[in-house]
Image: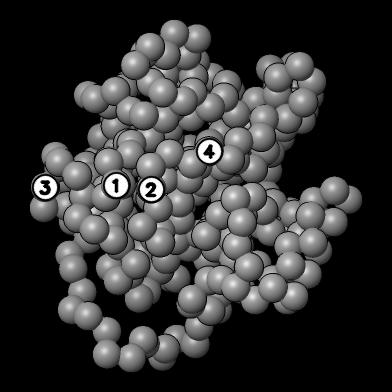
């Protein structure tokens, strides 16, 4: 009910305010009219006089990304390093086993397994965002740092006893350079309309595809179709056979590209015209 009310309020604000913006609403929110591009486009749609497309593969793995682009680097398992043109960096599902070779400004975590969190984050990290409840209240983050905004949408997870831990997982959303990246964390269920309203427009989705520890692959594909993100990056799959089984469910609707580097530059003008699964090499 609360999610439905929130979605309704967002829609009312968008209708009344048009270009209204405020600190509580990130640019990613598809329900807000400030988004320049329509949420759904006909297949033949192309912007007028588009600039020449840039390659999605990263040309430089170090240094600040070019203006208007994010660098997404796969560290391994469920950990990615996200870097912005303004010099901000964030590591997802930061843990004790796989870490980026630099200290990020922001670390996000989920506590489904020890490979998704740590009680000993590097003291040089400015902001540690834990995605599970504290003192009985769901995690709620909406952090702005330099040109990066990070917020979360709580979801439920199964506990080790087979029950439900409410709000035990967080989908973290990273918003910079007009690109919205969603890391689904340890997602265990399909998304409800309230989740989708809270998430808004998603350009890149980092999705666990193991099919067992998280959501089964058929339902995870349903989540991908719900989000309609142009770019899908698999993670958390433990082996090539599991990955191939996931890819077989999407080949009719998505192009599949195997990157030769673990890093990717993504910009508003470089998002693929056809939905694409991009496989970044690294430990699963």
Along the line of sight, which residue is nearer the eye, 85 or 109?
85
Number of numbered discs: 4
CA distance separating discs 4 and 3: 28 Å
Q: Quadrant of residue 29?
A: bottom right
Residue at which label 3 appears: 60
SS category of the residue bearing label 3 = loop
Residue at which label 4 appears: 143
Along the line of sight, which residue is nearer the eye, 79 or 88?
88
Q: Are marks 2 and 3 in contact (CB under 8 Å)?
A: no
83 relative to 42, above or below: above
Residue 211 showing in the rendered view: no
> What is the number of the mark on residue 86?
1
Earlier sequence position, callout 1 versus callout 2: 1
Residue 35 showing in the rendered view: yes
Q: Position of residue 17 (x, y in %)?
A: 69, 73
Residue at which label 2 appears: 147
Q: Quadrant of residue 284?
A: top left
Q: Are marks 2 and 4 in contact (CB under 8 Å)?
A: no
Residue depicted at 49% across the width and 23% down the height: 128
Residue depicted at 47% across the width and 14% down the height: 118
Q: Position of residue 116 (x, y in %)?
A: 48, 23
Earlier sequence position, callout 2 versus callout 3: 3
CA distance separating discs 1 and 2: 5 Å
- On the picture, is 202 further left or further right than 131? left
């Amino acid at each position: 009910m609360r999610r439905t009310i929130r979605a309704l309020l967002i829609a009312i604000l968008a209708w009344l305010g048009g270009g209204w913006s405020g600190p509580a609403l990130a640019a990613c929110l598809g329900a807000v009219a400030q988004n320049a591009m329509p949420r759904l486009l006909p297949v033949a749609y192309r912007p007028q006089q588009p600039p020449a497309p840039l390659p999605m593969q990263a040309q430089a793995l170090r240094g600040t990304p070019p203006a208007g682009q994010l660098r997404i680097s796969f560290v391994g398992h469920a950990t990615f390093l996200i870097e912005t043109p303004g010099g901000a960096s964030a590591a997802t599902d930061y843990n004790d086993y796989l870490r980026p070779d630099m200290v990020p400004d922001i670390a996000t975590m989920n506590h489904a397994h020890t490979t998704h969190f740590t009680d000993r984050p590097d003291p040089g990290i400015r902001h540690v965002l834990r995605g599970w409840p504290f003192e009985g209240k769901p995690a709620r983050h909406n952090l702005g740092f330099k040109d990066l905004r990070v917020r979360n949408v709580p979801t439920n997870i199964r506990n080790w006893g087979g029950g439900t831990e409410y709000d035990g997982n967080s989908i973290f959303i990273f918003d910079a350079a007009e690109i919205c990246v969603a890391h689904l964390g340890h997602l265990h269920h399909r998304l409800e309309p309230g989740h989708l309203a809270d998430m808004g427009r998603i350009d890149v989705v980092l999705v666990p595809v193991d099919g067992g520890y998280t959501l089964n692959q058929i339902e995870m594909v349903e989540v991908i179709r719900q989000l309609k993100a142009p770019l899908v990056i698999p993670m958390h799959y433990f082996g090539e056979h599991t990955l191939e089984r996931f890819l077989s469910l999407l080949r009719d609707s998505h192009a599949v590209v195997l990157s030769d580097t673990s890093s990717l530059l993504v910009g508003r003008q470089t998002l693929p015209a056809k939905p694409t699964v991009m496989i970044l090499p690294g430990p699963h």
